[in-house]
Image: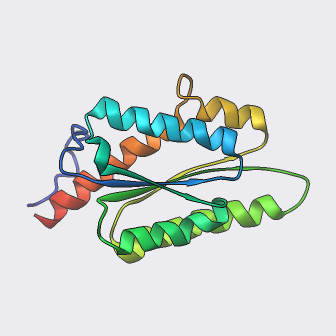
Amino acid sequence: MKLDPTAPAPTLDPRGLSVALVSARFNERIVTQLRDGARGAWQRLGGAPAALVEFQVPGAFELPLACKLLAKSRKYSAVVALGCVIRGDTAHFDFVAGECARGLMHAGLETGVPVIFGVLTVENEAQAQERADPSRMNKGGEALEAAVEMAILARDSRE
């Protein structure tokens, strides 16, 4: 199948797809909302409950390895990383956020499985709350939708 770059975004139909949802426990209150948003999007799209498989890791820094391992397993059509890194008074934010983003990008590029960056990198908790809340910006739902779209693209490019 030849991909048409001018085609509109596909209908997000998760039937036949499986998605690994990997959540960091650090900043748990925020990440729980991201996870709730992702679950809600999966349900709204009509995804099979058993096809959304959830995992947890200690923090954002651990997300890349977990996502790469899950992607390499070939059990999942896509992997979604959810976490939250809030800027503090030290350079720690820069290292964690930057390496998390780099590692997740490498996981997808090295495995060919879509790995979605659903990690909030924010200045303060108010920004995190606004972005994570499923009734407001719902970045968890957006990450899940991106995973479905990219999984469809990956599947169709192999046909």
Which quadrant, please, contains the C terminus?
bottom left
Percent position of residue 140, x then y: 50, 40
On the rendered structure, is 141 left or right of 124? left
Residue at image point 61% right, 51% down: 83
Q: Quadrant of the N terminus?
A: bottom left
Please say if 47 is above or below 116. Answer: above
The residue sitting at the top extreme is 135
Dividing the picture into quarters, in which one does residue 155 lie?
A: bottom left
55 vs 17, left or right, is right
| Residue 85 drawn above or below residue 43 | below
On the image, the x and y values in percent for residue 133 come to 59, 29
- Name the image quarter holding residue 70: bottom left
Q: Which residue lies furthest to the right in this view?
A: 89
Side of 151 relative to 96 (left or right): left
Q: How many marks?
A: 0
Q: Which of 9 and 99 is in front in this view?
A: 99
Residue 94: x, y in percent?
Answer: 76, 62
Q: Residue at x 66, y 39 (%)?
A: 30
